[in-house]
Image: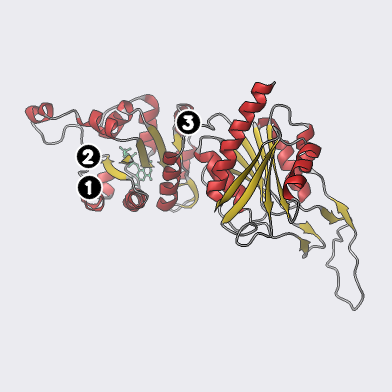
Amino acid sequence: MNVALGVGGGIAAYKAAELARALMRHGFTVSTVMTKSACEFVTPLTFAALTGRKVITDLFGNRSADEILSSSVEHIEVAQQNEILLVAPATADLLAKFAHGLADDFLSTLYLAFRGQVILAPAMNTNMWEHPATAANVATLKARGHRFIGPDAGDLACGTVGAGRLVEPELIADAVAACAGRKMDLDGETFVITAGPTQEPIDPVRYITNRSSGKMGYAIAEAAVARGARVILVSGPVQIAAPLGVEVVRVRTAAEMRDAVMANLEAATIVVKSAAVADYHIANVPDKKIKKTAARVTLDLDPTVDILAEVGAKKGDRLLIGFAAETNDMVAEARRKMQVKKADMIVGNFVNAAGTGFGSDLNEVTLVMSTGETVPVERATKKDIAHKILDHALRLRLALHSAR
Ligand SMILES: Cc1cc2nc3c(=O)[nH]c(=O)nc-3n(C[C@H](O)[C@H](O)[C@H](O)COP(=O)(O)O)c2cc1C
């Protein structure tokens, strides 16, 4: 697949060289287009040497009229030859030009001629990013269906701290690869996905938790975003980074998770409950640490809120997908859970299967659906399983709608 990499004139232009390499490692053919300002920060030679391809910096170049007219019109040719136009760093100036349709250099002219997927990775000073003019341009470009990657927040080259840093090149390349490989069949959907374990405090320093890593829920969030969905990920404490483009709500306890899910339910079209929520919490958590003594301690546990059942009772037209981690009678247990909780699909997995489940990058699941269908999904990476779950969720919703 071919990517036109547009490089704007910002400090982060040097990172675009690394990005070109990362895109090539993903198998993309990269054609670089640099603005005049970008050439002040890095040389076209860097990109030509890295990509092995000509770098375009100018609409007209040093060519005679005959030379220009005897070859094909370059910005139209580049627009037709590439499936993706990725601009990184996208300067405030480029965002403004794109939003308003100006075409006074090669990159902005290419943008207007381009009909493929546009991905923008902005980088600039925080004040520039937060300026109402930039915010309005970003809103216009988003409304046009363009994808934004970042910016990140952190230390900026201008010496300030805040939003405006270019997302790391490797992560941009991963996100582009994810976009490129998938159809955008979840465009317009909003997912609320829960993931990870919860922590139920025993006292101010101790808690009860479980072995959930959050990997499955995070993989579903990543897959859904790559297919065009808006994703709100309600995450318990985990050790993994949030996928790009996902809105993360961090929670600790089952009660906090319930509140975050219910607060976002209105927006959701599909709810995926993959978190391993604690079944019990301590009835009365002391505000002082429990002292160690020789005496036996008994903890009084109350059941936690049943989030799946509460969403099931209020789900309306939403598709509700739950998870059941079982050690035996998995399909029967999944079917029972689906009926009681009013879920549309339960993803059942044997937690004691060797090499899969908690913490592993692999999984092997059975999809139990309210239509009566049961689909075994062979052992695969959690990423691949995530896409299979989403494929079946769309199919299931179609079947449920046409059955009404
Ligand atoms: C040292 C320096 C650093 C700059 N860094 C940025 C930046 O990170 N982001 C940005 O939007 N503009 C930045 N600018 C301003 C742009 O270079 C300027 O708006 C230019 O017109 C952008 O041209 P282009 O959008 O055609 O690449 C910087 C300017 C200078 C002199």
Instruction: Please tell me which residue is depicted at 83% across the width and 67% down the height of the picture.
Output: 289
Residue 356 lies, in percent from the top left, at 61, 58
Residue type at mark 2 is: Thr
Residue assigned mark 3: 142
Q: In the image, 18: left or right of 276?
A: left
Q: How crowded is mark 1: few (under 14 residues within 10 Å), some or many (20 or more)?
A: many
Mark 3 residue CB less than 8 A from any atom of ligand 1: no
Instruction: Please tell me which residue is depicted at 28% across the width and 31% down the height of the picture.
Output: 79
Residue 181 visible to an observer of this rendering: yes
Disc 3 or 1, which lies upstream in sequence?
1
Residue 366 lies, in percent from the top left, at 65, 46
Q: Residues within 10 Å of mark 2 (few under 14, many from 20)?
A: many
Residue 246 visible to an observer of this rendering: no
Instruction: Please tell me which residue is depicted at 62% across the width and 37% down the height of the picture.
Output: 191
Asked whether the beta carbons under mark 2 and mark 3 sit within 8 Å of each other, the answer is no
Mark 1 residue CB less than 8 A from any atom of ligand 1: no
Q: In the image, 54: left or right of 404?
A: left
Residue type at mark 1 is: Pro
Residue 339 lies, in percent from the top left, at 78, 37
